Image (cartoon, rainbow, N blue to C red):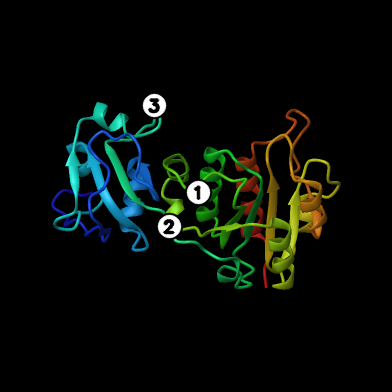
């Protein structure tokens, strides 16, 4: 920020202070976020109920904005903050405890906008991958990511750090039955494309001009057979034989770019 420029107010809603000094874990129903981008995005998200911020003075100074008067902050040194987060997590002098985001439902994100793809993840459980996919989804204007309720990571500091703020702006829909969710997408006019290395067609060959849902499976296992059966088309990325496959988050980023740059109607 330019010296002398007035900082904006970080419009977070502060709740009562919870979680004791050096507790190392969040209270029930709470999540802990760390790192400047994740914490700053959460503070700016009016949908977040914030509980407490642990920070170094350098961490507070790094924020692009000012905390509301009376916001619960406990100053600590970097070593103390390290005890509040995952091992070796780069907290950057900021750890925020807040309530988990409210549930988002599938019908709330299916507006049929061809410019905004849906990203469907079948049993992708690695929080770093889900966070990276959220970041790509934000970058390319996706409508939402859709995962299973059980076979997906919970909202967490690891997801938020990997998402670099995107957790606060990209809706994350959790469903009990992914196959049924795909049926609902079809009923809403979405063309469902499953990405798999054994497909004959490339993604560019099957991308429609209308609304699209991009379906990706976990690394190694890939999409389950039932999920493939609920896709309108299967497609592969045109990678060379030099590598067997791509990381699922890299594949999602490429697919989202392809969807964002196609001709739509």
Q: Find disc 1 in the rendering and name its residue.
A: 135
The reply to whether callout 2 and callout 3 are in contact (CB within 8 Å) is no
Q: Position of residue 81 (x, y in %)?
A: 27, 33
Q: Nearer the viewer, mark 1 or mark 3?
A: 3
Quarter of the image with the C terminus is bottom right
Q: Find disc 3 in the rendering and name its residue.
A: 88
Please tell me which residue lies in front, 3 or 112.
112
Q: Is residue 94 left or right of residue 244?
A: left
Q: Residue furthest right?
A: 200
Query: In what element is the residue under mark 2?
Result: loop
Q: Find disc 2 in the rendering and name its residue.
A: 101
Q: Is residue 231 above or below residue 18?
A: below
Q: Is residue 261 above or below residue 188?
A: above
- In the rendered structure, which disc, 1 or 3, sits on the residue that comes first in sequence? 3
Please tell me which residue lies in front, 43 or 4.
43
Question: Which quadrant of the structure image shows residue 101?
Answer: bottom left
Q: Position of residue 165 (x, y in %)?
A: 41, 50
> Dot 2, crowdedness within 10 Å: few (<14), some or many (≥20)?
some
> Dot 1, crowdedness within 10 Å: few (<14), some or many (≥20)?
many
Please tell me which residue lies in front, 254 or 45.
45
Determine the residue positioned at 79% across, 50% down: 235
Please tell me which residue lies in front, 241 or 127.
127
Q: Is residue 208 left or right of residue 47?
A: right
């Amino acid at each position: 920020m330019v010296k002398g420029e007035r900082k904006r107010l970080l419009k977070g809603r502060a709740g009562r202070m919870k979680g004791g000094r050096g507790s190392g874990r969040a209270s029930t129903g709470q999540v802990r976020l760390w790192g400047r981008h994740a914490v700053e995005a959460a503070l700016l998200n009016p949908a977040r109920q914030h509980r407490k911020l642990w920070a170094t003075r350098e961490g507070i100074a790094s924020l692009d904005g000012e905390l509301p008067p009376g916001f619960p902050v406990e100053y600590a040194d970097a070593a103390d903050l390290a005890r509040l987060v995952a091992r070796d997590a780069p907290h950057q002098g900021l750890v925020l405890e807040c309530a988990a985001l409210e549930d988002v439902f599938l019908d709330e994100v299916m507006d049929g906008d061809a410019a905004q793809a849906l990203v469907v993840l079948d049993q992708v459980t690695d929080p770093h991958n889900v966070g990276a996919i959220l970041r790509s989804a934000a970058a390319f204007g996706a409508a939402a990511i859709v995962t299973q309720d059980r076979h997906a990571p919970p909202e967490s500091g690891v997801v938020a750090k990997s998402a670099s703020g995107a957790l606060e702006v990209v809706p994350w829909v959790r469903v009990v039955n992914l196959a049924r969710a795909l049926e609902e997408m079809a009923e809403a006019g979405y063309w469902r494309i499953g990405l798999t290395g054994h497909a004959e067609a490339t993604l560019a060959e099957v991308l429609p001009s209308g609304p699209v849902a991009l379906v990706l499976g976990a690394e190694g296992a890939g999409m389950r057979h039932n999920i493939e059966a609920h896709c309108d088309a299967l497609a592969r990325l045109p990678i060379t034989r030099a590598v067997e496959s791509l990381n699922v988050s890299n594949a999602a980023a490429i697919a989202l770019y392809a969807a964002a740059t196609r001709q739509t109607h």
